[in-house]
Amino acid sequence: VKPQFESQTNMNCAVFTAIEYKTQVVAGTIYFIKVQLSDAEYAHLKVFQSLPQENLGPSLVGFQTGKTRDDPLTYF
């Protein structure tokens, strides 16, 4: 989902490392992922992965920027 994030935020991320995640099962799976963007900048991503038989890749459905490493990862 890095290209989707970069496109939606007009950012070019040299660092894009997932450091924590939570899941929510729906008709597929929603992932809430804390991603490190730089030494001090983090973002929280909401990614939807459809069921395997739909044969679709993950889709970025929301994000929150301006986060820190200590911000709790919450459902949004």
Image (cartoon, rainbow, N blue to C red):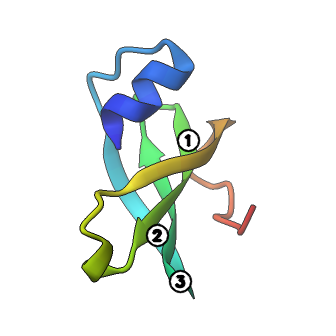
Number of callouts:
3
The image quarter in which residue 39 lies: top left
**Residue 36 in the image: x percent, y percent?**
41, 42
| Three-letter amino acid code of the residue under disc 3 | Ala
**Residue named by callout 2:** 21
Say above or below: 45 vs 55: above
| Three-letter amino acid code of the residue under disc 2 | Tyr
Identify the residue at image location x=68%, y=55%: 71
**Residue 28 in the image: x percent, y percent?**
46, 80
User: In front of the other: label 2 or label 3?
Assistant: 3
User: In front of the other: label 3 or label 1?
Assistant: 3
**Residue 59 in the image: x percent, y percent?**
43, 51
Rate crowding at label 1 as few (under 14), some (14 to 19) or many (20 or more) other CA atoms within 10 Å.
Answer: many
In the drawing, what numbered circle is on residue 43?
A: 1
The image quarter in which residue 55 lies: bottom left
Identify the residue at image location x=52%, y=31%: 41
Say above or below: 40 vs 58: above
User: Of residues 27 and 38, which is closer to you in this image?
Assistant: 27
In the drawing, what numbered circle is on residue 27?
A: 3
Q: Secondary structure at mark 1?
A: strand
Circles 3 and 1, Cβ within 8 Å, touching? The answer is: no
Q: Quadrant of the C terminus?
A: bottom right
Residue 39 in view: no
Residue 17 in view: yes
Real-space Cα separation, disc 2 to disc 3, in angstroms: 19 Å
User: Of residues 48 and 2, which is closer to you in this image?
Assistant: 48
Of the residues under marks 2 and 3, which one precedes in the sequence? 2
- Classify residue 46 as left or right of residue 1: right
Q: Quadrant of the N terminus?
A: top left
- Classify residue 62 as left or right of residue 14: right
